[in-house]
Amino acid sequence: MSGQRHRTADEVADLHVEIGHRLAGSDQRYSPVRRQIVDALAGAERPLSVADLIALVPDLAMSSAYRNLVVLAEAGAVDRVATDDDAARYELAEAITDRHHHHLVCTGCGLVLDYEPPVDLERRVAADLTGVARAAGFTAESHRLDLFGRCAECVDA
Amino acid sequence: MSGQRHRTADEVADLHVEIGHRLAGSDQRYSPVRRQIVDALAGAERPLSVADLIALVPDLAMSSAYRNLVVLAEAGAVDRVATDDDAARYELAEAITDRHHHHLVCTGCGLVLDYEPPVDLERRVAADLTGVARAAGFTAESHRLDLFGRCAECVDA
DNA sequence: ATTTATGCAAATCGTTTGCAAACCT
DNA sequence: AGGTTTGCAAACGATTTGCATAAAT
């Protein structure tokens, strides 16, 4: 399966505390708007585009969305997900959710779902990529293992 | 290591024939400008941005670059590589080169290198992803296994 | 002659930034 | 008050498109 699990009220509270700490660490405040953005991301089943976010958070100005996502990303609270199409998507950072995962991307409609890979596969991938990186003079930071295909809705294009 | 191997004159000739067929199949001509673009991509050691392409092909207009890349992509001659930064990159399609590979992306400067993963890892990945896709109601088309990190130049940001 | 490709310039679209007003401590 | 965050509008950069010209069949 895929998607992020539902979060209990307690879990969301912990989330806010953790993110508050991280923001404080980068000399940033945890403003109400930032909370709203985090709530929207926490409630979503998938990475959200800025357009999604604006639709979900009442009165959120586009500039605030972009600016706050930058701040949250720098604080390590959210991750920017590079997909295929032009619009960037964001989700709570893995460092926060403790759920390492990758993505299923629909080439028809752009839908992006999360999935957690089998642990041993993940281990193999991580180990091999470290070697590949070294050989190319790269210092590894992260990786992505995404699958492209057609979602149920789009199979018959 | 990484990068595409050098191609012999014969291989390049075959490449043009193959791409000519594919274009014909989509009711498109293999114009001189398109040939120049293919030559530039074939000669490159890595995926090229449109800016790279314009620098390599004398007098190539930006609009022609974009338009022809779309045509070539539709004909299955080139692949668009989605990276982190804003500028898209292009390379000869795997269907043409017969060299399945993935990418190393520098988070500092946007550099993208190719690498071919160990066959058994690749097999594992493909098999596991098929299962993941099925579970989510997706029909698998392709996947990407990219590594993000800092290239030698950018390690000390 | 008719269709297709090219180049220039204008238009789009996502994203970023300048600046003055609103907020927080 | 003093520094931060917000919202609006203008600025940007990558990509796309309209249209008239040039090339190919």
Image (spheres, coloured by chain):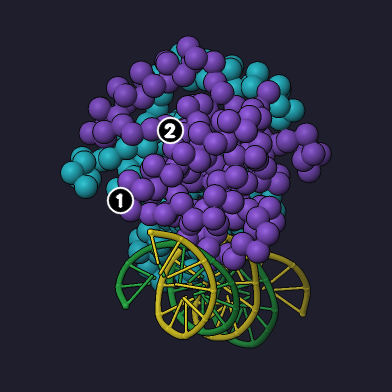
Chain colours: A cyan, B purple, C green, D yellow
Residue at 38% from the left image edge and 43% from the top image edge = B22
In depth, the one of B21 and A96 nearer the eye is B21
Callout 1 environment at 10 Å: few (<14), some (14 to 19), or many (20+)? few
The local secondary structure at tag 1 comes to loop
- Residue A128 lies, in percent from the top left, at 58, 17
Whether residue B147 appears in this view of the structure is no
- Residue A74 lies, in percent from the top left, at 63, 49
The local secondary structure at tag 2 comes to helix
- Label 2 and label 1: CA atoms lie apart by 24 Å
The quadrant in which residue C6 appears is: bottom right
* Image depth: mark 2 or mark 1 in front: 2
Q: Is residue A125 left or right of residue B1?
A: left
Q: Is residue A155 left or right of residue A144?
A: left
Residue at 65% from the left image edge and 55% from the top image edge = B57
In depth, the one of B52 and A139 nearer the eye is B52
Q: Is residue A52 left or right of residue A76?
A: left
Q: Residue A98: give its label.
A: none
Callout 2 environment at 10 Å: few (<14), some (14 to 19), or many (20+)? few
Residue under label 1:
A109
Residue under label 2:
B95
Identified by mark 2, the residue type is Ala
Q: Is residue B52 above or below residue B152?
A: below
Q: Is residue A108 above or below residue B15?
A: below
Identified by mark 1, the residue type is Cys
In depth, the one of A128 and B62 nearer the eye is B62
Q: What is the chain identity of the residue bearing mark 2?
A: B
Quadrant assignment for the N terminus of chain A: top left
- Residue B58 lies, in percent from the top left, at 68, 59
In depth, the one of D8 and A154 nearer the eye is A154
Q: What is the chain identity of the residue bearing mark 1?
A: A
The quadrant in which residue A49 appears is: bottom left
Residue at 46% from the left image edge and 19% from the top image edge = B122
